[in-house]
Image: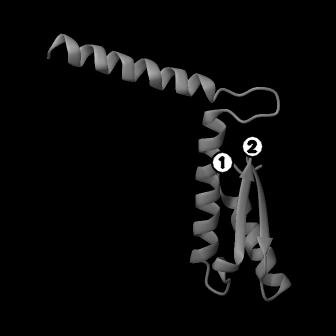
């Protein structure tokens, strides 16, 4: 590998480190890891609700912030609401 290619790779790695440092958490902000964890939780909860027969998962919105999940939307009965809540609680990482 030529000297030029090594320099470009070093610059790219340094840029990635700076970008990650810029994403570091401050007071009241989520860290990059927390954002990733939240997106994984959101995906798992949404997938569980969509897979559940008898619940229109497309009518339920899922938001996660620091492991706390907010479900919003419309279901047809209190039973469906309770089932959706139960599914969310079963996902690892949900507070």
Q: Position of residue 83 (x, y in %)?
A: 75, 75
> Residue shown at 59%/22% (left/top)?
21
**Quadrant location of residue 61?**
bottom right
Question: Distance between the Cα atoms at labels 1 and 2?
Answer: 6 Å
Give the position of the N terminus as an image quadrant: top left
Mark 2: few/some/many CA within 10 Å (<14, 14-19, 20+)? some
> To which quarter of the image does residue 84 belong?
bottom right
Q: Residue furthest top?
A: 3
Q: What percent of the width, then of the height, locates residue 82?
A: 80, 75
Image position, residue 32 (x, y; %): 61, 34
When the figure is inspected, residue 42 is found, relative to residue 4, above or below; the finding is: below
Q: In the image, is residue 30 above or below residue 46?
A: above
Q: Kindly identify which residue carries mark 1.
A: 38
Q: Secondary structure at mark 1?
A: helix
Residue 50: image location, x then y, percent:
60, 75
Q: Nearer the viewer, residue 59 or 69?
A: 59
Q: Nearer the viewer, residue 80 or 31?
A: 31
Q: Secondary structure at mark 2?
A: loop
Label 1: few (<14), some (14–19) or many (≥20) C-alpha neighbours in 10 Å:
many
Mark 1 or mark 2: whose residue is earlier in sequence:
1
Query: In the image, 13: left or right of 62?
Result: left
Look at the numbered discs 1 and 2 and tell me whether their residues touch, using CB distance below 8 Å. yes
Q: In the figure, 67 relative to 73: above or below?
A: above
| Label number found at residue 66 | 2
């Amino acid at each position: 590998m030529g000297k030029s290619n090594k320099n470009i790779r070093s610059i790219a790695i340094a840029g990635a480190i700076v970008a990650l440092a810029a994403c570091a958490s401050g007071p009241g902000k989520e860290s990059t890891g927390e954002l990733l964890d939240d997106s994984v939780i959101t995906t798992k909860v949404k997938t569980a609700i969509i897979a559940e027969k008898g619940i229109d998962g497309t009518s339920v919105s899922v938001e996660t912030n620091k492991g706390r999940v907010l479900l919003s939307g419309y279901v047809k009965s209190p039973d469906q609401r309770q089932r959706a809540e139960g599914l969310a609680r079963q996902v690892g990482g949900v507070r």
